Amino acid sequence: NAGVTQTPKFQVLKTGQSMTLQCAQDMNHEYMSWYRQDPGMGLRLIHYSVGAGITDQGEVPNGYNVSRSTTEDFPLRLLSAAPSQTSVYFCASSYSLTGNTEAFFGQGTRLTVV
Amino acid sequence: GEDVEQSLFLSVREGDSSVINCTYTDSSSTYLYWYKQEPGAGLQLLTYIFSNMDMKQDQRLTVLLNKKDKHLSLRIADTQTGDSAIYFCAESMRNSSASKIIFGSGTRLSIRP
């Protein structure tokens, strides 16, 4: 039972570098999303997808790109890392949003931008 | 707009009841959730309530929903040290263009002996 798998768990980047945070789920969930968690700010939605080929922006999308070429994978790309992107990133998936559905979360990626 | 608000901290004595409160702004919310995050881990669903209900009980957990005031609470009876965590309130929303889940800032529950 893999559930939602995020890699890497930890990453340090220099300002201006790019990288991709990986997220994969094996539950055939349609809905996937990326959040960032900062102290005192809770979880803020970056981007989300309601199915393969469909993505949309959340609350804080600037500086991040996503794509959803398959149901299973939803990578988050940082194009040019900035210190303000230092955060813990969580990927989540759920079957849908139309019922009493549970969102399953990955273990998180702790990103530091220096 | 979409906003979910919670207080940041709550401290209770072991054995007492904990009540964590949440307010939300979107009256079109369909489901409201409580998630628990233990240190170094992702979030896990604790319980949820459909927007046409006003109460749900599940063992030590009681969820109360006041839809008129857009107020949601989570009561944990007989609070134990294992209940120390951050608790997130969340709402599931649909509009003409999108469906999404919005989370509050989280309430950090600490237990005093």
Image (cartoon, coloured by chain):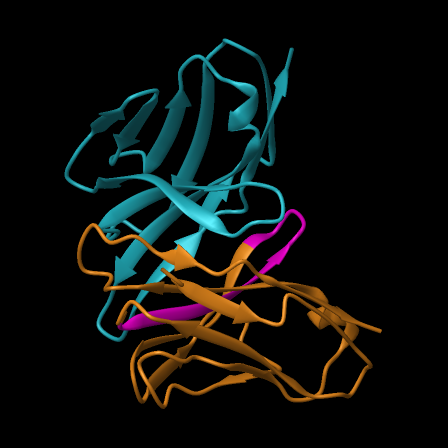
Q: Please identify the residue farthest to the left as the structure is shown.
A: B52
Q: Residue at x 25, y 48 (%)?
A: B31
Q: Does A83 appear above or below A39? A: below
Q: Quadrant of residue B85?
A: top right
The x, y position of residue B5, in whole percent, is 48, 43
Q: Is residue B1 visible?
A: no
Query: Quick one: A92 or A1, which is closer to the camera?
Result: A1
Q: Which chain is cyan?
A: B
Q: Please identify the residue farthest to the front as the structure is shown.
A: A1
Q: Is residue B21 magenta?
A: no
Q: Residue at x 42, y 65 (%)?
A: A4
> Is residue A19 shown left or right of residue A33?
right
Tell me which segment is drawn in magenta.
A30-42
Q: What shade has chain A been given? A: orange
Q: Is residue A84 visible?
A: yes
> Is residue B69 shown left or right of residue A81?
left
